[in-house]
Image (cartoon, rainbow, N blue to C red):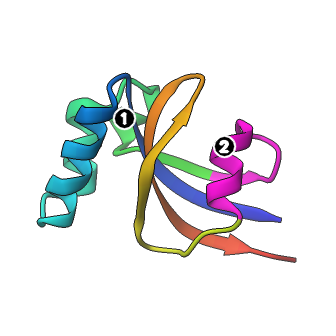
Amino acid sequence: MRASARHILVTDEDLCQEIKNNIESGVDFTEMAEKHSVCPSGTRGGELGIFRRGMMVKEFDEVVFTRSLKIIHGPIKTAFGFHLIEIMDRDVS
């Protein structure tokens, strides 16, 4: 099973929720990732590319491989901080 996703990682849950509210109000996800994400993927608009189940931490994997595509999920807490995750595509084969 493979998927592609993008995310924004921050260290503060309140900031994570504020960013999510902004995106849902029309602010560009890529712009928010570049501005706020502490993950190196932030420079790519949060793009993580294609990855297989088990390559990400458990909480992240659970969202990516079970929840709906093309909507913003989060805040999702992991050992790294708080994520907003958008699942772009998923291949169940």
**Pick the front one: 12 or 91:** 12
Q: Amino acid at mark 2?
A: Glu
Residue 74 point in image, percent of width and height: 43, 51
Q: CA distance from mark 1 to mark 2?
A: 20 Å
Q: Residue at x 26, y 54 (%)?
A: 29
Left or right of 74 on screen, residue 4 = right
- Magenta segment: 50-65
**SS under mark 1:** helix
- Image quarter hosting the C terminus: bottom right
**Pick the front one: 87 or 60:** 60
| Residue 35 image-quadrant placement | top left
**Pick the front one: 16 or 28:** 16
Task: Using a 10 Å C-alpha cutoff, classify the residue at mark 2 as few (fewer than 14 neighbours), some (14 to 19) or many (20 or more).
Answer: few
Q: Residue at x 69, y 67 (%)?
A: 66
Question: Which residue lies under the disc numbered 1?
Answer: 42
Which numbered circle lies on residue 59? 2
**SS under mark 2:** helix
Residue 8 point in image, percent of width and height: 38, 41
Q: Amino acid at mark 1?
A: Gly
Q: How many marks?
A: 2
Residue 67 drawn above or below residue 85: below
- Image quarter hosting the N terminus: bottom right
In primary-sequence order, the first of circles 1 and 2 is 1
Left or right of 40 on screen, residue 33 = left
Left or right of 4 on screen, residue 76 = left
